[in-house]
Image (cartoon, rainbow, N blue to C red):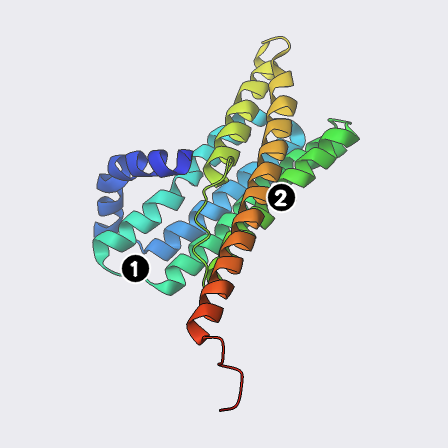
Amino acid sequence: MLNKYARAFFTRVLTPFAALLLRLGVSPDAVTLIGTAGVVAGALVFFPMGEFFWGTIVITIFVFSDLVDGNMARQAGISSRWGAFLDSTLDRVADGAIFGGFALWYAGSGDDNVLCAVAIFCLASGQVVSYTKARGESIGLPVAVNGLVERAERLVISLVAAGFAGLHKFGVPGIQVVLPIALWIVAVGSLITLVQRVVTVRRESAEADAAEAAAAGPGSGTAQ
């Protein structure tokens, strides 16, 4: 849901920056790779140490590359299947690093096995939610459902909460509780979204099979 509106807004805001990078000779693929590397480094260096505020700042800076690279490709007229594949694949890597960083914190100094498991569930369910749509589309179905918590919602909820939780290091008392709450929200929301997409694919596949059977006719399988 958020992805539909936020992406359009930030695309307009970042268009001049994308144009500048093109003039400097930077390729969209390079922006994709650098952005993903920055997100992974921010998540796996800062989050396991409990430095949620600075980790969130670093990740937020680099996460906008996901909008800049596509903008650059459109402006240059070089949008390609490879670029779309690379972007989607590295999105999964970045998401895995973010929730993996949370899991490493709770498995280590955070000392909370339940929240470690919740973070791992967020990681896995996010990957599966993306897979269900991609797999459904690959077999010719529209998968016409957005779902409650998509990638944009997962990132915004978890990163905003992590940023606020990091204020604990600056003397804000009790603020660290927002991250566990956010992880539970993302976990439950991802589960609901997964169910929504599975139900949608089941319905659409049944409709497609029925349409094919009706088009074939009642005597299509009988020798004449």
Q: Residue at x 28, y 48 (%)?
A: 71
Q: Which mark is residue 109?
A: none
Q: Is mark 2 on a helix, strand or loop?
A: helix
Residue 90, position as x, y percentages in the image: 49, 52
Question: Counting other residues with Cα less than 10 Å from the Cα at mark 2, is it few (<14), some (14-19), or many (20 or more)?
Answer: many
Image position of 152 (left or right of 81): right
Is residue 139 in sight in this rendering? Answer: no
Image position of 152 (left or right of 74): right
Residue 55 higher or lower than 22, as above or below = above
The residue labelled by disc 1 is 79
Q: Residue at x 65, y 24 (%)?
A: 180
Q: Distance between the residues labelled 2 and 1?
A: 29 Å
Question: Who is closer to the viewer here, 153 or 64?
Answer: 153
Image position of 16 (left or right of 160): left
Q: Do the residues labelled 2 and 1 touch (CB within 8 Å)?
A: no
Question: Splitting the image into 4 quarters, where does residue 174 fall?
Answer: top right
The amino acid sitting under disc 2 is Ser
Question: Splitting the image into 4 quarters, where does residue 99 fall?
Answer: top right
Question: Who is closer to the viewer here, 3 or 174?
Answer: 3
Q: What element carries label 1?
A: loop
Question: Counting other residues with Cα less than 10 Å from the Cα at mark 1, is it few (<14), some (14-19), or many (20 or more)?
Answer: some
Question: Who is closer to the viewer here, 24 or 150?
Answer: 150
Residue 135, position as x, y percentages in the image: 53, 59
Closer to the eye: label 2 or 1: 2
Residue 19, position as x, y percentages in the image: 22, 46
Q: Which of marks 2 and 1 is nearer the N terminus?
A: 1
Residue 39, position as x, y percentages in the image: 50, 41
The residue labelled by disc 2 is 125
The amino acid sitting under disc 1 is Ser
